[in-house]
Every structure is written in structure tokens, then in C-alpha cells.
Image (cartoon, rainbow, N blue to C red):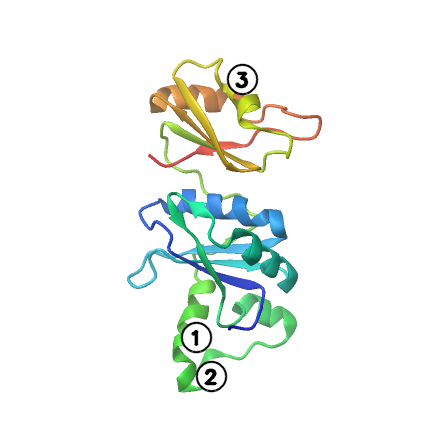
Amino acid sequence: MLQPNPTLYLKNIDWKIKKPFLRRALYSLFTRHGKVHEVIVLRREGLRGQAWIIFDDVQAAVAALQAEQGFTLFGKDLVIEFAKAPSDRISRRDGTYVPKAKRAKTDDKRADENEGTTAATAVPAATPLPEAPPSKYLLADNLPQECNEMMLGMLFRQYAGFKEVRMPRPGLAFVEFEDEPHATLAKNGLNGFQITANDRLNLNYGKN
């Protein structure tokens, strides 16, 4: 079994899901377990259907692995393992970084994986994820614990074209409309809506 470290390796992901939407969904799913530095999703050959979640500490990664192992995401059960080595970012912080040129040839495979976890497409947790293209689906993330499907349904039902709300887990919801124009009207009207004393609704487009 691989040694626990702050970086999780995910596989069995539906690679047809658009990258911005997938990264946002993964961030929403895992950030509840601790501070997430980066969410890495790559499209190049051999890395499709895989992702890396880089936490700030090992404890958060362990908790996330135990809680989310087998979670059904977009119709497929997640398979989660610890990465073969921590990301370069975490290694530099902890003073354990070894330049790739100095690594043994037997570690080439590991080096390739670490290269993936530091790719230019990595998204810092503090940076807003890019806006997905317009669609008939809306994604609501970072919802407060008390928020449920009934509450959200009452909120979105006031907009024409509303079909349903689905919450795969607390804090994350998918809202479906008949078409993109109806979804856009709801997004423009409710994005930033004060749903509790301390929380505002954060809406983005989901996948088609």
C-alpha cells in the first residue's frame, strides 16, 4: 500500500466531462475535508479519466480518501489512492524536493506522474475556476449544511423552465432547466442570492 501523503490520485472518472466543470465538481467534493491547494485534470493520452487532488496536509487527504472512496460521480464510482509521491509544490514546502534530473531512472514513471500534478493547468484553490460555457444545467457549490433539495427547489421554481434539483451530497447541487436561456435567466437572477445570514448562492454553468 502506498504511503499516505497530501496528494490523492483519482481514477475511473468520466473523461467526457468538460475540464472546468469537472475541476469545480471535484473541488467542491473534496474541499469539505480540508484545504485544497490544487485540482489537476489532464486530457492527454494515457491520463484521461484521472485526476489529482493536492491537500495542504496528510490528515485531510486521509479523511477524504476514507470518506469519498467509491463515491458515485457522474455515474462512475471513484477509485482513490494516495499518489506515488507528494506533489512538487508540497515537497518544496516541506524541504524534501528532489529535482527530476537527479531522480533514479527507475523513478521515471513516478516523475511523469508528479509532472502531471504540477502542470500549467493546475488550479490553485484560492483562484476562481474558469466559467464553464452556457448550458441548461447549473452547478451550485459550497452550499451551507442546512441547504437541501426542497429549499433549493422552492427557490428555483420561480423561474420558468425549471425541471429539477439534485444534490449528490451536502454542499453540492445540480439544477436542470428546459434549455440554456431559462438556465441563464435563473443564474443571472439568483447568483449571489443571500440564502442564509452568512452564505450567498454561488452558481455556475454545468455540463450539457
Query: Which circle, 3 or 1, is nearer the viewer?
Result: 3
| 7 relative position to 130: left or right | right
- Could you tell me if the residues under marks 1 and 2 are in contact, i.e. CB atoms within 8 Å? yes
Occupied quadrant, residue 148: top right
The kind of residue on which mark 2 rests is: Arg
Tell me the crowding category of disc 1: few under 14, some 14 to 19, or many 20 or more residues within 10 angstroms, Cα based: some
Instruction: Find residue 103 and name its label.
Output: 2
Marks 3 and 1 in Cβ contact (< 8 Å): no
Amino acid type of disc 1?
Arg
**Above or below — where is 179 with respect to 53?**
above
Where does residue 205 sit, x and y in percent of width and height? 42, 33
Identify the mark at residue 154; answer none if there is no mark.
3
- Answer with the quarter of the image where residue 161 lies: top left
Q: CA distance from mark 1 to mark 2?
A: 10 Å
Q: Nearer the viewer, residue 15 or 194?
A: 15
1 or 2: mark nearer the eye: 1
Please tell me which residue is depicted at 47% across the width and 24% down the height of the picture. 187
Query: Mark 1 vs mark 2: which is more N-terminal?
Result: 2
Where does residue 65 sit, x and y in percent of width and height?
Answer: 54, 58
Going from N to C along the chain, the mark reached first, 2 or 3, is: 2
Helix, strand or loop status at disc 1: helix
